[in-house]
Image (tube, grey):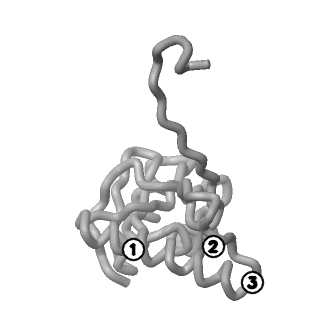
Amino acid sequence: MLGQLGIGAEFALHRWHPIEEEWQSPDVAMPQTEAERQAEHQRLEDAETADSVAAGSAGWQARVELESHREAVALAHKLQGEGHPVVRRWKFLVAGANNEDDAQALAEHIRQEAPPGATVVAEPAGVRLPFIAF
């Protein structure tokens, strides 16, 4: 049909690979076993960590919204004392992580330490934080 209209086009078929989080050729085999899924997940985490190291800043973060400025200051000091890179803005703070797994673990740690009413989310970094290897 396009040829009849004098329009040239190239087509490619790709599918989303949910573990590696990228588009791949359908010729690439999807993992079939739990061990294969774990290996692919580890490759993704290693790549995210390498990206953080290369950029010199955290690629993931735990974002925290607290009910008061005082709570944010106290939690930021506690996390910094534990060696976490933290940026604080009034009642909000973000703590950097190297990859998604690290961000999830950090968010869970913060949930245990944060006062009641705090909202904690692990997400890709919106604010680039200095990289610190853990």
Mark 2 closeness class: few <14, some 14–19, many ≥20 residues within 10 Å = few
Cα separation, mark 2 vs mark 1, equals 25 Å
Q: Residue furthest right?
A: 33
Residue in the foreground of this view, choosing between 37 and 124: 37
| 128 up-or-down from 114: above or below | above
Mark closer to the observer (2, 1) = 1
Q: Secondary structure at mark 3?
A: helix
Q: Is residue 102 left or right of residue 30?
A: left
The part of the image, by quadrant, that contains residue 24 is bottom right
Q: Is residue 107 left or right of residue 18?
A: left
Residue in the foreground of this view, choosing between 33 and 126: 33
- Specify the amino acid type for callout 2: Gln
Residue matched to label 1: 49
> Residue 83's mark?
none
Q: Can the viewer see residue 63?
A: yes
| Residue found at x 69% / y 88% | 35
Residue 95 percent across, percent down from the top left: 42, 63
Q: Secondary structure at mark 2?
A: helix
> Residue 112's mark?
2
| Residue found at x 61% / y 62% | 115
Cα separation, mark 2 vs mark 3, equals 30 Å
Mark 3 closeness class: few <14, some 14–19, many ≥20 residues within 10 Å = few
- Specify the amino acid type for callout 3: Glu
Q: Is residue 80 left or right of residue 39?
A: left
| 82 up-or-down from 89: above or below | below
> Residue 34's mark?
3
- Specify the amino acid type for callout 1: Thr
Q: Earlier in the sequence, mark 1 or mark 3?
A: 3
Residue 9 percent across, percent down from the top left: 48, 29
Q: Secondary structure at mark 1?
A: helix
Quadrant where the image shows the N terminus: top right
